[in-house]
Image (cartoon, grey):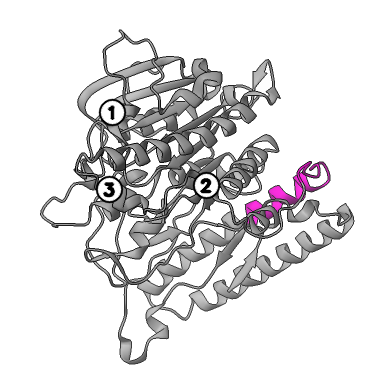
């Protein structure tokens, strides 16, 4: 196993490794495809913020058709300062989160399908199977342009094994990003660890020292490639195919090393101090992770990110809001007014901190506008109403202009049943990544521009 420049690689499981010729399927990360174009001289970024357990529908969605005008409901009121920079999307559906004969497990499916548009294979074992998520699809096509193809942030430590929801693996519940059918990308929850990973070469080490370390990593990569070529001649055809995929992944890491080497001498130190530990207060933890995401975009360390506020089905309490009951328990409100009021406070809390993040992006000048103008930040949930576990008419907010691809300041009412993945096809296009289809999409999302 070799770790370096934000990537870890390991030799795939080869038939030749197994006793008695017993072979198992091995999943290998696909190599990144050809680099995509960039809209203009300033890059476009994309991020996805996931909210668990649905929302208080009454206080989230506008009550009347305002003819496309954006009405900020009580829950969305914190977005007032960026009202002209967001779109409220209604009518979008996540069909892959429905049961389709698999019975209960809506929370696992909501998280798993949210960015993949794919129905997870129901298992609590090792045979997990899910499609590539939209963030990783973008990262695989244009992630070689930055020091890191993508980052995955969260507030909860997750598990990848075990049963977490009615027979669904914990991997489905606790991960948003998937780089391959059986390869979830775990969330980093420690702000300090995120800082070290993103800005480790800007921690005071001289450019000469950092450049020497990068040269050493390049030497190791060259050695591994040379060794794999010698091994290749001794393997069967099936193993040769696996090894070819492995060497392709090495070449992708090699590209990242070269990118880091070329950027090292000009990379500025972050103007944010390194966070120490995980804050006890949820609001402080949440804001720190948002700040790191904003910093990574501003310094162009990465252009793709995900942020999982909590795993779906989370029963987190909110002492800052004087709410001792768990979120998941409250989401099964049964129209109880006290529970609905608590849900309203939780939703408002989530939107408040999301708004703070957007204001930070808006107040960061870039080009002839702001950093937010060159971003697409989607916030939403894979469940509409936690009491019903429904996956249509989802609560979705899309912020930013996507480098000019999106006209904000509107309420875009999509036809009922419109796949959420239609939005992803349009967002990929704004990133310069062409995709005729993604997940269960049946076209682009009309009206964004």
Check disc 3: other Cα within 10 Å, few if <14, some if 14-19, many if 20+: many
- The residue positioned 52% from the left and 51% from the top of the image is 152
Q: Are marks 2 and 3 in contact (CB under 8 Å)?
A: no
Q: How far is mark 3 from mark 1, CA to CA?
A: 29 Å
Kindly identify which numbered label has been placed on residue 3: none
Find out whether residue 316 is within the magenta segment.
Answer: no
**Foreground tag (2 vs 3):** 2
Q: Position of residue 14 (x, y in %)?
A: 41, 77
Check disc 1: other Cα within 10 Å, few if <14, some if 14-19, many if 20+: some
Report the residue marked by disc 1.
58
- The residue positioned 52% from the left and 71% from the top of the image is 10
- Outermost residue toward the top? 67
Check disc 2: other Cα within 10 Å, few if <14, some if 14-19, many if 20+: few
Q: Are marks 2 and 1 in contact (CB under 8 Å)?
A: no
Report the residue marked by disc 3.
118
Q: Nearer the viewer, residue 242 or 410?
A: 410
């Amino acid at each position: 196993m070799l770790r370096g420049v934000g990537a870890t690689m390991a030799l795939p499981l080869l038939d030749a490794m197994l006793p008695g010729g017993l072979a198992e399927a091995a999943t290998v990360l696909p190599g990144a495809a050809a680099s995509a174009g960039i809209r203009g001289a300033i890059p476009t970024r994309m991020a996805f913020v996931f909210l668990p357990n649905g929302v208080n529908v009454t206080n989230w969605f506008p009550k009347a058709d305002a003819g496309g005008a954006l009405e900020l409901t009580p829950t969305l009121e914190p977005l007032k300062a960026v009202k002209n920079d967001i779109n409220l999307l209604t009518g979008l559906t996540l069909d892959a989160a429905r049961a389709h004969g698999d019975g209960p497990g809506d929370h696992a499916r909501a998280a798993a399908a949210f960015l993949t548009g794919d129905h997870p294979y129901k298992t609590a074992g090792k045979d997990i199977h899910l499609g590539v998520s939209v963030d990783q699809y973008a990262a695989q096509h244009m992630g070689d342009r930055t020091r890191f193809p993508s980052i995955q942030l969260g507030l909860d430590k997750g598990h990848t094994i075990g049963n977490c929801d009615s027979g669904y693996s914990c991997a489905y519940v606790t991960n948003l990003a998937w780089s391959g059918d059986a390869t979830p990308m775990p969330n980093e929850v420690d702000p300090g660890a995120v800082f070290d990973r993103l800005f480790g070469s800007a921690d005071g080490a001289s450019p000469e020292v950092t450049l020497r370390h990068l040269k050493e990593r390049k030497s190791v990569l060259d050695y591994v490639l040379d060794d794999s070529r010698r091994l290749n001649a001794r393997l069967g055809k099936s193993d040769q195919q696996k090894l070819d995929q492995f060497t392709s992944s090495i070449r992708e890491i090699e590209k990242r090393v070269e990118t880091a080497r070329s950027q090292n001498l000009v990379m500025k130190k972050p103007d944010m101090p390194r966070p120490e530990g995980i804050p006890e207060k949820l609001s402080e933890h949440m804001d720190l992770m948002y700040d790191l995401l904003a910093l990574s975009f501003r310094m162009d360390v990465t252009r793709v990110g995900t942020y999982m506020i909590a795993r779906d089905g989370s029963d987190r309490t909110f002492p800052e809001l004087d709410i001792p009951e768990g979120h998941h328990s409250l989401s099964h409100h049964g129209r109880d007014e006290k529970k609905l009021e608590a849900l309203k406070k939780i939703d408002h809390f989530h939107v408040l901190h999301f708004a703070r993040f957007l204001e930070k992006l808006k107040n960061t000048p870039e080009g002839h506008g702001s950093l937010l103008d060159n971003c697409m930040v989607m916030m939403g949930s894979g469940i509409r109403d936690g009491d019903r576990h429904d996956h249509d008419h989802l609560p979705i907010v899309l912020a930013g202009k996507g480098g000019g691809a999106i006209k904000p300041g509107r309420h875009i009412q999509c036809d009922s049943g419109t796949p959420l993945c239609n939005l992803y096809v349009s967002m990929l296009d704004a990133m310069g990544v062409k995709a005729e289809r993604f997940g269960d999409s049946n076209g682009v999302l009309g009206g964004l521009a």
